[in-house]
Image (tube, grey):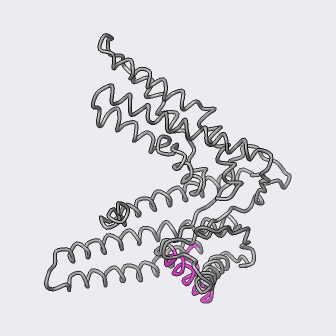
Amino acid sequence: MNVTELFNLTEWINSEISENQILKLYNALHSILQQNTQPSQAKQPFDEQKNVLVEALQKAPLNRLTLAQVNFLHKLGIAPYIGSEGISHLEEILVKNPIDPATAASNVQAIITSMTQGVEKSTVIKNGLEGTVDSKELPADEVLIRVSFANDAVIANIADFKEWGSKWHTIGRGIAIIHDISPEDIRIIGASNGSILLDLGVTHLIASTVSRIINKALDIAERIIEIRGEAEKVRTMRLSNDKIATSLEAEAKKVNDEGVEKLASEILSQLNEGKALDGNKQNAFNKAVGHLINFLSKGGEVDCVLPEDSETTQEDEGGTQDGSTRIQIAALRESFQQIRDHSAKLRVLEHTPQDDEVENS
């Protein structure tokens, strides 16, 4: 996450958490729960306080944040208690596992403490960065695609740099020419280190096609993970003949190979409305799909950094949005939110007992 993103996140916290008085609503609920711990007082209903809080949590627009911003929001101790995750957490405390008023009050107080500390840290960061961040907006017809080289798709040396640079050239070129766009129109805006990030300025069309590929690729990945999970189960049974596990691994490879071909064909058909396509373009696109799926399967991530919604239409060039652009951005925001949700599900599927052993060692 770069400095501009960090500053924008602090502004988001100020707007969506502080100004919307999320902490005040949590405190109102806690006050009723605390009263109910007193044996000398009649128990008071807290449905109204709970419902008002849930409504406010639902409105927190987490889908306007980048993955890096959401991850930092978790580190601040705020993310688990807003949005759908926050509502689930609250339901767990008040409905699914209600032990006694004292425990419920204590659990809600823990949320308030965590969020208060997170907001305080954010405020310190915001005040420190105020007036020092130069935020440059992309042109209105572009969005930012963020590529994260991590896990088995990491760039650890110059050989990795050459390999992934070549593959991302193939990905960009294949997707660009299918839309009759020059590959040079995919601009490299910047890069940062850590798990290496590459920021690409792309058209809405390219971003939309990338999101289609990723969403369908994650379906393939989920099926492959399930098959390989079955293979592992067979191996743990210590059967003298491991032909079943070997067959399952072969099936996983088949699902991958056939899935790539089918995915590319399906998307091409949609993009060209069933019309015949130039062979060179088709081959380039097929290679792009294959490399992108390979990148994702090795743990690389692709996110979309979208501009804020603008309800006003202006005619200057300062990153303005007309009605059509707003619709495109809204569709991209929904698509990449689906990708994030699907990716989170896959991380759960990929988690094994061995992972817990490593974390606890």
Residue 245 covered by magenta stretch: no
Which residues fall within the magenta stretch?
A: 273-295
List the single residue furthest toward the left.
240
Residue 95 picture location, percent across and down:
32, 33
Magenta span: predominant SS is helix
Looking at the picture, tell me which residue is in the foreground, 285 or 342.
Answer: 342
Looking at the picture, tell me which residue is in the foreground, 331 or 62.
Answer: 62
**Quadrant in the rendering for residue 239:** bottom left
Question: With 236 as the anchor, is 303 left or right in this view?
Answer: right
List the single residue furthest toward the front.
361
Question: With 163 as the anchor, is 229 left or right in this view?
Answer: left
Relative vertical location of residue 55 with respect to residue 216 in this rendering, above or below:
above
Task: Indicate the quadrant containing the C terminus: top left, top right, bottom left or bottom right.
Answer: bottom left
List the single residue furthest toward the bottom.
280
Taking the image as drawn, is residue 331 in sight? Answer: no
Residue 148 picture location, percent across and down:
58, 68
Looking at the picture, tell me which residue is in the foreground, 251 or 19.
Answer: 19
Point 59% across, 38% down: residue: 119
Residue 96 picture location, percent across and down:
30, 37
Point 41% across, 82% down: residue: 258
Residue 246 picture location, percent across and down:
26, 85
Question: With 245 as the anchor, is 95 left or right in this view?
Answer: right
Question: With 242 as the anchor, is 51 left or right in this view?
Answer: right
Residue 279 covered by magenta stretch: yes
Relative vertical location of residue 276 with respect to residue 96 in this rendering, above or below:
below
Task: Indicate the quadrant containing the N terminus: top left, top right, bottom left or bottom right.
Answer: bottom right
